[in-house]
Image (cartoon, coloured by chain):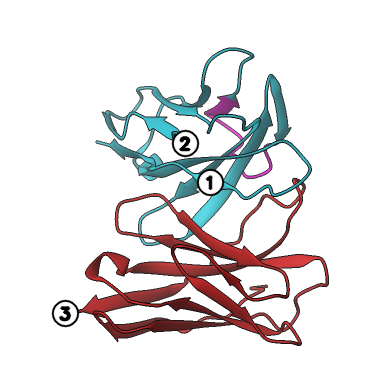
Amino acid sequence: DAKTTQPTSMDCAEGRAANLPCNHSTISGNEYVYWYRQIHSQGPQYIIHGLKNNETNEMASLIITEDRKSSTLILPHATLRDTAVYYCIVRVAGVNDYKLSFGAGTTVTVRA
Amino acid sequence: NAGVMQNPRHLVRRRGQEARLRCSPMKGHSHVYWYRQLPEEGLKFMVYLQKENIIDESGMPKERFSAEFPKEGPSILRIQQVVRGDSAAYFCASSPPAGGDNTIYFGEGSWLTVV
């Protein structure tokens, strides 16, 4: 059973913020939310992860709802190079949880 | 700090030949994972290794596939007697030792084409 649900696809205008939602209503207390993306013909690229607080790094921001049942990945100023499949994954941040479940993800297309 | 390094990036093999894919983890990482992505499908876990040990190979096909991570040198994913259905992208990933942030980082992949 999928632990996360994401929209199949979304379009975004270049230079605008891209907000990618993810539902994880069955998340456990010790599970983190991880985001990866896969640009065509490349390997999955780690973006960001968080437990319950909002997180920000040089690539993106992650907003997690207070009940932790959903989250949003924000790409603040999307560029054409951000066109990719984005995966929202929940996992325990420990070495025993390594079978990452890559679902279908959200195909994000950034348009000029 | 170099990322996860995989080679070759692209490999073409005839049916029945052997394919060897190599992976060097990120510096300081002692855990290596192999995933496979079949055409138009998602990534699937294959095997988890530490130095000289296979920890979990539950995702590996029972025949023809093997993996190792020797004390010295890269991790190797070996596919014997390749068939057309083995054509896929094979991704290696690594993470630090247990404790602390153990985010898993992926390499750029090795694309195997069996003709």
Residue A108's place in the image compared with B18, above or below, is below
Do callouts 1 and 3 point to residues on the same chain?
Answer: no
Q: Is residue A27 magenta?
A: no
Compute the Cα span from label 3 to label 2.
32 Å
SS at mark 3 in the image: loop
Chain the render paints cyan? B
Amino acid type indicated by mark 1? Tyr
SS at mark 1 in the image: strand
What crowding class fits label 3: few (fewer than 14 Cα within 10 Å), some (14-19), or many (20 or more)? few
Q: The disc numbered 2 marks a residue on which chain? A: B
Relative placement, left or right, of B19 versus B76 is left
Tell me residue A78's x, y (percent): 31, 75
Amino acid type indicated by mark 2? Val
Q: Is residue B65 magenta?
A: yes
Relative placement, left or right, of A68 versus B115 is right
Tell me residue A110's x, y (percent): 26, 77
Q: Which residue is mark 2?
A: B4
Residue A74's place in the image compared with B99, above or below, is below
**Disc assigned to residue A112:** 3
Q: Which residues are magenta?
A: B57-67
Identify the residue shown where x is 34% and y is 76%.
A108
Tell me residue A63's x, y (percent): 59, 80
Identify the residue shown where x is 74% and y is 45%.
A95
Chain the render paints red? A
